[in-house]
Image (cartoon, coloured by chain):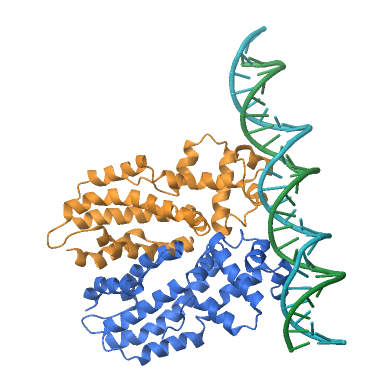
Chain colours: A orange, B blue, C green, D cyan
Amino acid sequence: MQVNSVETLLANSLAQSDLSEKQQNVLKACLKLFSEQGYDRTTTADIANLAGVSEGTVYKHFKNKREILDALLEPLKASVLPAVADEFVAETGKQHFDSLEAALRFLISDRMRFVVDNRLIIRVFLQEVLVNTDLFDSALAMAKQRFVPAVLPMLANFSQPQHPLTLESFRPIFGLMLTYLLPVILKPALQLDVDQATAKILTSVMPALT
Amino acid sequence: MQVNSVETLLANSLAQSDLSEKQQNVLKACLKLFSEQGYDRTTTADIANLAGVSEGTVYKHFKNKREILDALLEPLKASVLPAVADEFVAETGKQHFDSLEAALRFLISDRMRFVVDNRLIIRVFLQEVLVNTDLFDSALAMAKQRFVPAVLPMLANFSQPQHPLTLESFRPIFGLMLTYLLPVILKPALQLDVDQATAKILTSVMPALT
DNA sequence: TGTGAAAAAGTGAGTTGACACTCACTTTTT
DNA sequence: AAAAAGTGAGTGTCAACTCACTTTTTCACA
């Protein structure tokens, strides 16, 4: 499946947009610059330069610098809107995994891939969260909205009387994912073998779940 | 013990410094403002305002704005320098814990408290890491320098033939700590019961270690 | 299919405002 | 009375944004 793959959020949104090639270059340049130097330390001259356009062009389709940031982050928010989340849940439900481990393997590797593929946007988002506390709450709500419905069917299917499965059961998994993902977010140049990490997480976590 | 406690890094460094009260207020104001709005979005007028001093005063002891940021972050770096790290290791080694669980309980709660107590400085630091990729490497090196020597004696004492204890054994612990600490860093207003979190981590993790 | 006029896209020198920093002066401390 | 600390109006720079103009694209109609 891969609802969202391959530096996807931006790629998708560019494909769907009716922006000219130069305007698309502006967005690409901003993703690179914002993720590397931060929004505040990136000048519109920097952007125009890297995008290979004039400063005036930058402002033809974006009212101001802030609007470019929003244009970059919007797909991240959009990817958690019902439509996409439903697609994910449907996909997850459809596959009828015949074991808890298989279901978890899918869920873990899918979400890790999402983070790895979109690490630049996530970096920019994280920068913004650290500077705008309000954002944290909506981000958390967003994440839950995506996570909970994807995971509930699993709870229903695989929970056993002796080993009741709750949302809290996922904390160790989430923690381990974080130990693999945080470095990649903080230093995007790092490589991560998602399948290998997933395997390690599963071997660490399965004993406690069965 | 608590090598570093109670919004400590700043408090300690203020106590040791020969800064006047107004200059100390400048640093306190900067910690609040930088951690809330970010370094770049905080103006020197903001700082002077909150500190209750004139803008000129801000510049009497700090050559420029950047130097204030460094003054704030320096204790964070200093706390990982050999002297302090040694103190921690000595303390850890001295206590001669009679079980792995007791040793872990100490280590986990101590480090979590450190993060909780210094969350504002850590926030500012994280902002900076996200904007200056070089910093990541030195931060990781710093963290390891502090972590590894504190943990090695434990490995030696409690590792058993059937259950060899390696650095990798700590990954699940670290992951679980992250799940509790990240929210507090991202939203400093949140409360965290460190002892309770430590207990939960231990019950989740001990079975696999014994 | 070629023409030209209107619309859309792009340009970059110029304007404006904000913010980091200075300095001649005043107040406080030693 | 000398030194240290503090002041705040003033200055210079720099970056976001504008706008009058040029270039490219679109498309109605001969």
- The quarter of the picture where the N terminus of chain A appears is top left
- The quarter of the picture where the C terminus of chain A appears is bottom left
Position in image of residue C20 (x %, y %): 70, 63
Which of the two residues, B44 or D9, is positioned nearer the viewer here?
D9
Q: Residue at x 52, y 34 (%)?
A: A18
Asked if residue B77 shows in the view, the reply is no
Relative to B125, is B98 on the left or the right? left
Position in image of residue A206 (x %, y %): 22, 64
Relative to B140, is B18 on the left or the right? right
Position in image of residue B206 (x %, y %): 24, 75
Q: Residue at x 63, y 42 (%)?
A: A58
Which of the two residues, A135 or A106, is positioned nearer the viewer here?
A135
Q: Residue at x 58, y 47 (%)?
A: A66
Relative to B10, is B163 on the left or the right? left
Position in image of residue A117 (x %, y %): 42, 53
Residue A144, above or below A64: below
Quadrant for residue B115, please give it: bottom left
Asked if residue B79 shows in the view, the reply is yes
Residue B65, above or below B20: above
Quadrant for residue A99, please give it: bottom left
Q: Residue furthest left?
A: A161
Which of the two residues, A145 or A52, is positioned nearer the viewer here?
A145
